[in-house]
Image (cartoon, helix red, strand yellow):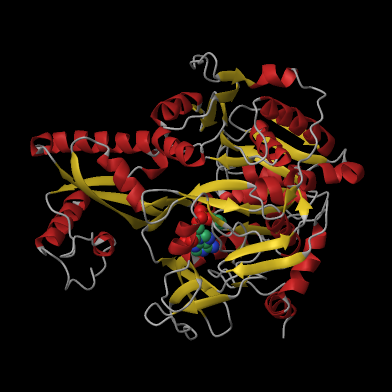
């Protein structure tokens, strides 16, 4: 048996022993009494009775040994700024920020909503919340006011922290303005909003008695020390909203001890990052990849982490490799879409810089096609590892673990189940295990390993209902992804089983986009599907029925109307969710019981056979879809 296979087997067969060993990778203020309490399946409590704190493990713990080493390296090609913080400086900033947050009456268990661009203060705010035992909920800056409002109402934060603006491709993006709008829409708004004023948006409005300036507050706490609040291992550390089948985003809740241990173990065995080295993750703090591998993972490991505000091809397509070379990056993490973007650029940029210290490039977030995987590995001359996971799990489900064994990479495959995951591929029909090269639903036999979501925020029932009831007689966690395993044990992910789509690595629910389209007053009904896109993996496409047909009577009016609908989506949900096209039809394909036949629409849009249509109410609806698609490509 290979070393990794052995390692994985032990993580399942000798679960408690395995995880007790991994738990030594972090500091415990008080040791745990039991590794796992699984008395209430599928709810798992890891490291029961142990007291710890994420901020302590990410920051304070390193002061003695590496206080003067770099912790956070901020590089913005948008503003031309860069700033570096040693662990000691990061500690000071986090204490100031924690004092500021505490002064707003925030205590253990209170929620703080962070809606910020990629600036160091966003990281300080996350770590400061962790220090206080407050629960942060970071919302991705690409989400617009309506999405933000629904997250405010679900999390009910006491406080929000934002900035005046972000920057993307040289253009300012209003943050504070959107926060104002979201607060107007919300039923349960926070009592205070702290603003980091970057001086980008000169005329954002300030609401007296509610809005506070971070610089002013920070100045009052330059030397304040805020003691760490020790949390029992299962107490929540954060909530991160993610999309599913319904229009209502789910608050993925993560614990404290299991989370810290899983990240520490993944940094060592999967990412092969060593203390004192530098990691560069190109995601955003608003996504799970940013939470795990910009903020907590590298810092828990005692590494320096790069926080990059900018695009991969500005000022030129060599910028990331320049950053890698200049900062001696040993671990890099990016997305398949970024790889496809870079593939279209001059390959000379990849040879311009010394990348010899880079041990691996990890890619995740969406399917990595074989040609892009091969191209990236060959051009970079370094191993490129595809790995597969979800917001729900917080760290890899399928991966190779070069820290344990350098297993050969197969292009297009995220390799093997990560340690701790009892992964199965189950036939959809009878929940039996799929054979080699047979498609099945990627499922995990609970208990989910440490670091995975512990519940849906405020809704245990929804957690069980959503993730554990796909198979009637089997209590398993479903990922909602299809997968296959080849004869050598390598896995391949074949796409989602549900209505979730993935646009450039951004996970979106088609139902959410439909609701945003329907916010336009002239839309009666709409179906949104994801269609394959060469660059972004998938793109949303909308088929809408209007109320007043006079508004789309001529081609010009149609175009005008389509634009209006797209702008409605931008405003409601965010430009990342904007459909590539809005096609107008008078009828949508549905089953006789009224269910939208999204799969058939998607198949037609991708030029495939629409599949089984025995339940369709009116076949003419599909003709309209065909006609709309044909007209658009004519
Ligand atoms: O469909 C899978 C796809 O992205 C989904 C999870 O997205 P998110 O919650 O945003 O978490 C991203 C964390 C990296 C999965 O259900 N996905 C993620 N990684 C891969 C992938 N699909 C294929 N290959 C991958 N490596």
Q: Residue at x 60, y 60 (%)?
A: 452
As drawn, 536 above or below 153: below
Image location of residue 284, percent across then percent down: 57, 43
Q: Quadrant of the N terminus?
A: bottom right
Res. 50 in view: yes
Q: Residue lying at the far right in this picture: please name it.
A: 64
Instruction: Identify whether 25 is placed above or below 494.
Output: above
Vertical placement of residue 579 versus 469, above or below: above
* Residue 187 picture location, percent across and down: 41, 32
The quadrant holding residue 257 is bottom right
Rendering coords of residue 38 (x, y %): 63, 69
Q: Is residue 191 left or right of residue 540?
A: right
Relative to 217, 250 lies left or right: left
Residue 368 in sight in this render: no
Residue 369, relative to residue 612: is it above or below?
above
In the foreground, 532 or 247:
247
Residue at x-position 11% and y-position 49% = 586
Number of marks in picture: 0
Residue 34: where, in percent of width, then height?
75, 66
**Residue 581 appears left or right of 431:** left
Give the side of residue 535 with respect to residue 19, left or right: left
């Amino acid at each position: 048996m290979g070393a990794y296979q052995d390692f994985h087997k032990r993580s399942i067969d000798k679960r408690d022993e395995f995880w007790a060993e991994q738990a030594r990778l972090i500091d415990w203020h008080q040791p745990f009494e039991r590794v796992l309490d699984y008395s209430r399946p599928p709810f798992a409590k890891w490291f029961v009775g142990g007291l710890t704190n994420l901020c302590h493990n990410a920051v304070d713990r390193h002061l003695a040994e590496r206080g003067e080493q770099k912790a956070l390296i901020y590089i913005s090609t948008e503003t031309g700024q860069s700033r570096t913080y040693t662990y000691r400086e990061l500690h000071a900033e986090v204490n100031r920020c924690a004092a500021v947050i505490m002064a707003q009456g925030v205590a253990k268990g209170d929620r703080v909503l962070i809606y910020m661009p990629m600036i160091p203060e966003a990281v300080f705010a996350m770590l400061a919340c962790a220090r206080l035992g407050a629960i942060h909920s970071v919302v991705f800056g690409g989400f617009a006011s309506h999405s933000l409002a629904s997250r405010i109402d679900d999390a009910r934060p006491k406080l929000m922290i934002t900035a005046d603006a972000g920057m993307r491709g040289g253009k300012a993006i209003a943050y504070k303005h959107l926060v104002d709008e979201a607060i107007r829409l919300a039923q349960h708004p926070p009592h205070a909003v702290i603003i980091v004023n970057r001086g980008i948006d000169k005329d954002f409005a300030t609401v007296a008695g509610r809005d506070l300036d971070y610089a002013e507050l920070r100045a009052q706490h330059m030397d304040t020390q805020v003691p760490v609040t020790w949390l029992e291992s299962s107490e929540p550390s954060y909530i991160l909203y993610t999309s599913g089948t319904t229009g209502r985003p789910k608050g993925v809740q993560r614990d404290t001890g299991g989370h810290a241990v899983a990240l520490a173990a993944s940094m060592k065995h999967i990412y092969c990052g060593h203390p004192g080295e530098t990691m560069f993750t190109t995601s955003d703090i608003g996504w799970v990849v940013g939470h795990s591998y910009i903020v907590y993972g590298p810092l828990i490991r005692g590494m320096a982490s790069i926080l990059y505000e900018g695009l991969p091809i500005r000022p030129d397509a060599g910028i990331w490799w320049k950053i890698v070379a200049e900062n001696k990056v040993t671990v890099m993490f990016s997305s398949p879409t970024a790889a496809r973007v870079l593939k279209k650029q001059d390959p000379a940029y990849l040879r311009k810089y010394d990348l010899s210290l880079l041990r691996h490039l990890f890619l995740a977030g969406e399917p990595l096609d074989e040609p892009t995987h091969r191209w990236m590995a060959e051009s970079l001359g370094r191993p490129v590892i595809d790995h597969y996971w979800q917001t729900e799990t917080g760290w890899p489900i399928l991966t190779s673990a070069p820290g344990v064994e350098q297993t050969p990479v197969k292009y297009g495959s995220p390799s093997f189940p990560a340690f701790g995951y009892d992964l199965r591929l189950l036939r959809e029909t009878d929940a039996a295990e799929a054979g080699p090269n047979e498609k099945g639903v990627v499922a995990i036999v609970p208990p989910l390993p440490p670091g995975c979501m512990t519940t849906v925020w405020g809704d245990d029932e929804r957690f069980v209902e959503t993730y554990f009831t796909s198979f009637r007689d089997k209590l398993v966690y479903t990922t909602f992804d299809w997968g296959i395993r080849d004869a050598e044990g390598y896995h391949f992910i074949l796409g989602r089983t549900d209505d979730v789509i993935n646009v450039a690595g951004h996970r979106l629910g088609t139902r959410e986009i439909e609701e945003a389209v329907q916010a336009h007053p002239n839309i009666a009904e709409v179906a949104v599907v994801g269609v394959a896109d060469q660059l972004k993996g998938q793109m949303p496409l909308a088929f809408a029925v209007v109320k007043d047909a006079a508004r789309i009577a001529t081609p010009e009016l149609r175009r005008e109307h389509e634009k209006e609908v797209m702008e409605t989506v931008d405003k409601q949900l965010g430009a990342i969710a904007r459909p590539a096209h809005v096609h107008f039809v008078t009828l949508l394909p549905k089953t006789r019981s009224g269910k939208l036949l999204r799969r058939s629409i998607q198949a037609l849009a991708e030029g495939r056979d629409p599949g089984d249509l025995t339940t369709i109410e009116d076949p003419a609806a599909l003709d309209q879809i065909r006609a709309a698609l044909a007209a658009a490509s004519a």
